[in-house]
Amino acid sequence: MILVNQAIQGILLGGYYALIACGLSFMFSVMRIINLAHGSLAILSAFALYVLADRFDVSPFLGLIVVVPAMALIGWALQRTVLERSARGGLLVPVLSTFGLSIIIDNLLFQQFGADTRSLAPYIGDLSFDSWAITDEIAIGKLAALTLATAIVLLGGIQIFLKRTQLGRMIRATAEDADTVGLVGVNARRVNAIAAAIAMATVAISGAFLAMRATFDPYAGALQLIFAFEASVIGGAGSLWGTLLGGVVLGVAQSLGASVSPQGFFIGGHLAFLVALFARLFFGDFGPRLRRAFLGRAA
Amino acid sequence: MSAKSAITVERWTRESRVALVVAALVVGALALGPTMFDANIVDRLTTLFIYVILAVTWNALVGYCGLVSIGQQAFFGLGAYFAVRLADSGFSVYPALFVAALIVGVLSVPLSSIMLRLKGGEFAIGMWVVSEISHLLVNLDTLINGETGTSLIALNAYAIDSRRALTYWCAFAAMIGLLAIVFFLLRGPLGAAIQAIRDNEEAAESVGVRVLRAKRLVFVLAAFGAALAGALWVATAVTFQPKTYFSPQWTAYMIFMALVGGLGTFEGAILGAVAFFAIEAWFGGAGVWYLVGLGATALVFALALPRGVWGWVEDSTALRLLPIGYRVHFASDHARGEAASGPAPPRET
């Protein structure tokens, strides 16, 4: 029974990881860039929501109405100023420039907010601790369930958007071959900037859930980046449904690890990641296959 | 036009011969270190040597081989850890520094089999995960006391002055040794092979470069270098706190040094280490703004000047002080160049 509970909690936790990995995965599948500032940008949106809640009494959910568009704008600007230029420089430059960016964001946040850990939990009332009791030993937290549901809706929504809408088709085509889409009248630069904006909008949402379910501080971004990365690699890099699966696997592995030893939480997750890498060695990459299923014939 | 007489190939130029003599003099002077300088300068130079080790080995991995790792702190921390571990189990402390780095080098061989399957950003963060795992596993050792850490108490056996001098000479020897290894490796067939991999892996493979073998060699060398730096760092700092040693800040420093000095240039990495050392001395006290500045500088260099200061000097003046490659002069360049747009710079291969 304890094991069942661990598994359920792991799946719920996986919802959060899928959420934070969503933007990373999306950006990778469209622009082939791994944004190392991903975690720091999630923390940035968490702080933005915190300021809105703390100074202006805006509930975090209402705050998202401001923060999501703001982060989307940042995504657009980021693509135009940093990512686009970096991507032209080959594989190396985006890694270096986005790492530089993450150092800047982390330290500016530290300069502004100091080392205190903060949380949005006090601003969402009962939601932060309410739960449905399933049996005596198993309870499902309402916030955790909401996180998982958001992840599913977001990932599913993006998938439908990519499959069914004109803009979605343009994004997929640009991911496939940015030069050729230019020939048929698609402005690849604009499409990539929109894609970056979408990715950052999801980062804002994941930042909100990160801040509601736990505490954060200016340097918490690195760990979030690692979780997002692990979830997307376990699920097959660049595939959104794979990301959900990867998030759940990561969550369950951490949750089971934690039941073995106090330090097992992180070790369990990292081990799941390494096992996924090993599996890649022996069975080939699942990523492209899932990606094909997800982007249609793309990749 | 006869091709043979029109092309001359050279490696050493007059400037590079002068540079070699100057370098030899500097090395000679530094070797005397502790007998000549006062304690404060000796300590600072030891730090500088460690930075040079970090910059040069990271540059070999990233600038030459094209493998961006942001997890080299894994090896830095493990090097320090094994040094503490070996010293605790009765191993003589200074040899332990080098043995610790060797152990990490050996451990990095099987690790490379998995990690080198990853490409680009995936490799970069994958290495970060490796450093997180190493950190957690090191914390499991009861000797370390978790995040509280421990000290290299074996150093207490030495008087403070002889300890300072010994650490200095160890760092100095390690730096010179690694510089020599990297220099000669890059000049040889491996250097050509890894640069070919960096520029186009498929093309390199198609002309017979054994890609995985070449990458692995550089990966292990970089791991060894970072581990040696970590072991030497614990010898200077004495305390070992896992959090400080497994911090991604070390990678930030390495990126800064290599990017600013000149990614993919041998002299640039050394220049970058000296520049970082100077900047830290002047601005290190500025705390957070200093780190913001480091990040911003790295970002600007990555976008605007990806080959760094030295890469820029090389590209605009064709100056090579410690030549890794060869230069091909075309006798007809001058005539042809004037017809087109100014003289063509000599090409480096």
Image (tube, grey):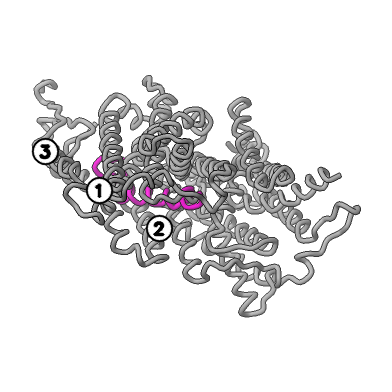
Is A198 covered by the magenta stretch?
no
Nearer-N-terminus badge (2/1)? 1
Nearer-N-terminus badge (3/1)? 3
Where, quadrant-wise, is the N terminus of chain A in this rendering?
A: top right
**Residue B29, percent from left and from top:** 15, 44
Vertical position of residue A31 compared to residue A198: above or below: above
- Which chain does the residue under circle 3 lie in? B
Q: Which residue is mark 3?
A: B21
As helix, strand or loop, the secondary structure at mark 3 comes to: helix
Visible residue check, residue A58: yes
Specify start and end residues of the magenta stretch as a single range.
B242-269
Q: Which residue is mark 2?
A: B295
**Residues at circles 3 and 1 in contact by the CB criterion of under 8 Å:** no
Amino acid found under the numbered disc labelled 1: Leu
Residue B278 image-quadrant placement: bottom left
Nearer-N-terminus badge (2/3)? 3
As helix, strand or loop, the secondary structure at mark 2 comes to: helix
Where, quadrant-wise, is the C terminus of chain A in this rendering?
A: top right
